[in-house]
Structures are given as C-alpha cells and as structure tokens.
Amino acid sequence: PVLFHLHSGLFMRFYEKECGAIKKKFVRFILNHAAYIFVLAGERINELIKISTNRKIIKIPNPIPFDGQTRHTDTDAPSLLYLGRLEKEKGVFDLLQAISVLVKKYPGLMLYCGGDGDVTEFTNRARELGVETSVKILGWVTGEKKRALLTQSSIYVLPSYFEGMPMGILEAMAAGLPIVSTKVGGIPDLVEDGIEGYLVTPGDLPNLTRVIDLLLENKALRRTMGDAGRLKVQNHFCPDKALSQIEEIYRELGAIPAVQGT
C-alpha cells in the first residue's frame, strides 16, 4: 500500500501551470492509486477531489511538541518576528511596506527576520523605504536563538501568498505569540481570525498594517490571543494527536507494530 503525504502549498500551481497533459495524467494516476492521501488542511481536500477519483483523503495537521517552557514574555519594546524565506511570495516585502508606515507611530519598532532567500533585494527594498535600521536579518535560526526570538518578540507575522501548514506559526502559537497572517493554505485551520490573531487577504497592505497596529497598541489583546494560541496547540496539535491517526491507518493496512525489547 502507498500512503501519499501532500504538504506543499504550491501543489495545485505545479499541477495546473507546470504540468502538461502527460504529467497531469501521471499525477492523477499516483493520487488515484494511493491507499490514502494525507493532507494538512481542509482546503487541500477540496482541491484534490477536483482532479482525483480517490476519496480516501485524510486531514492530519502538522504536529509540534509542546514543552510548556518556551513562553512569550511581552516587553515594552515593540518587535515583529518573521521566520521564513525572504521572497515576495512569502509577503515579507509587503511587511516592509507596513513597517515603513508603522515606524512613524512606533519609532523603536524592530522587525527580526530569520531566514535566507533574496537577501540583497530585501535589503535594498528596506533601504528604499527608509527602514533599514528597523530591520534585522538573522539568517536561519535554530535552537536557543529561535527560542529567544519566540519569547521576546511582540507579534509573529507571516503575510504569505501561499502556504501548506507553516511550522513557524505553530511554534509561535506554542510560545504564546499572537499571529498576523493570511487566509491561505492551512493557516485558517491554525488561526481563527480575531481569536489567536488576525488573518488578512494576501497583498492587502492597509489591512495588514491596521491589524499589526491594533496588536502593537494593545498589550492585553496580545496576551489574550497568545494564550488562546498556546491552548489550541496544546489541545489539537501535539504529536500524540497526529500519531494516533497515522497508527490507526497503518494497522488498517496490515502493519503490525514491532515488539519493543525490555
């Protein structure tokens, strides 16, 4: 039996724009003959049933360990955290434009960017907008450095144009950070608009700026949304939740767990 995991937020673009008739036929063959297809979000199910006859499609979201120790400690120094590639389709260039407006109200505002990508273009755009001193590019961050960023930032922002189910958002929610993101991919399955954060339409710069401003000026709201995010991760996105679903399917398909030695 074949279990097909589909996690990419760009799958439908690949299928529709980059595949000719033969490649599309091959993709459909693989999908149609899988014992099960695992997806991250309900939106992907709706897309797949348009191109595949396979109805054994199961939503199993990305899990994340919840240690309860990485806890956001809000400070009076306003800062935004972005973790991901520095490319236009991730919306980080839109974020620069929002920053250029917000720094007029919050002169000490900082944007911390953990990731690589179009670093030169990103830096040049920040300079053009006059916000280069308000932006710090950190490269890929892991371990204690990431933990420190998650605990010390005010808001986690990911204004992406496409996504599967971003681990960065899950990590930020687990740490108690409020989220500002977009209504794409599996993000609405993670963040309910107005509860764990705010969701905007990709490219909607006025609304992106507005909701960041709302959170920056209201510390109590940041705390309330951050607490709601932590609770959601703890209740719905811990590894045990996903593993039990996957284990059930493996058993159904005939897999027998190995006997553990003592």
Image: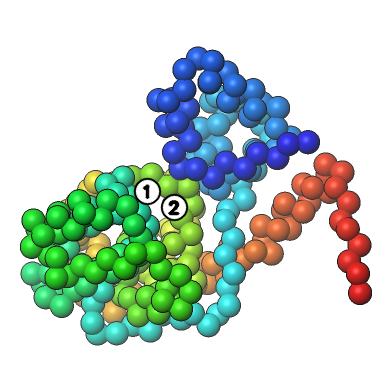
| Residue type, label 1 | Lys
> Does residue 225 show up?
no
Give how far across and how far down residue 41 sits, in percent. 53, 46
Confirm or deny contact between disc 2 and disc 1 (CB under 8 A). Answer: yes
Give how far across and how far down residue 1 sits, in percent. 78, 36
Give how far across and how far down residue 119 sits, in percent. 25, 55
| Residue type, label 2 | Ile
Residue position for label 2: 187
The residue closer to the viewer here, 126 or 175, is 126
Is the residue 139 above or below the residue 49 in the image? Answer: below
- For label 1, the SS is loop
Residue position for label 1: 183
In terms of image quadrants, where is residue 97?
bottom left
Alpha carbon distance from label 2 to label 1 = 6 Å
Name which residue lies at 24% across and 85% down: 76
Residue situated furthest front in the rendering: 120
The residue closer to the viewer here, 195 or 229, is 229
